[in-house]
Image (cartoon, rainbow, N blue to C red):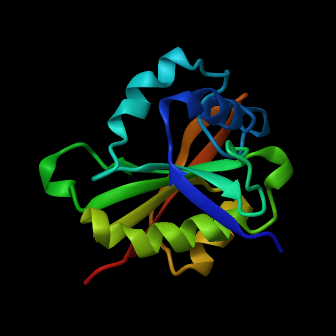
Amino acid sequence: MPSYVHRLARRDDLPVIVDIYNSTIASREVTADTEPVSVESRVGWFNDHTPERRPLWTIHDAADTSADPEVIGWMSYSNFYGRPAYSGTAELSIYIAERWRGKGLGKYCLEQAIAFAPQIKVHTLLGFIFGHNAPSLALFRKFGFDTWANFPRVANLDGVERDLIILGKRVVD
């Protein structure tokens, strides 16, 4: 099984981050976006991910020792609800390049995210996952995330109403 490494995303990673994100739209399993997003539209989002509070990481194959290793996925911590009292809670997002899916990269990301959360003063992690996204739900549950909310039929994807499940895990007591 491959091993992975990660680093803080750089501004010049944004095009590949957007490409990986856009590659998930057609499946209608991962994101509520129904059309591809542009790099320009994601600049503000990218800038909101500060290393000391809400890092955005790019993931790489550890065997790729080139000077500029291929970005094969990314993971971010994002603010939950945007109010100061919630600063200890973060939403996790994990996106994986199509040819790297099913190879343990999601597992690597969750292991790293849970371990790192206390360093950025995060005690609670959340995953916002569609109810029909069985692989992601299973992955988060494998790491001890429980269903904390179920929003039935809140998303409409091509005329099909879909549930949003919020999974949560307290990582620091």
Q: On the image, which quarter does residue 22 sit in?
A: top right
Image location of residue 109, percent across then percent down: 58, 64
Say above or below: 23 vs 39. Answer: below
Quadrant assignment for the N terminus = bottom right
Is 104 placed left or right of 18 in the picture?
Answer: right
Q: On the image, which quarter does residue 25 sit in?
A: top right
Label tally: 0
Residue at x 75%, y 35% (from the top left corner): 23
Can residue 133 be seen here?
yes
Image location of residue 116, percent across then percent down: 40, 69
Can residue 147 be seen here?
no
Residue at x 60%, y 29% (from the top left corner): 33
Q: In front: 157, or 72?
A: 72
Residue at x 44%, y 23% (from the top left corner): 43
Say above or below: 105 vs 144. Answer: above
Q: In front: 50, or 149?
A: 50
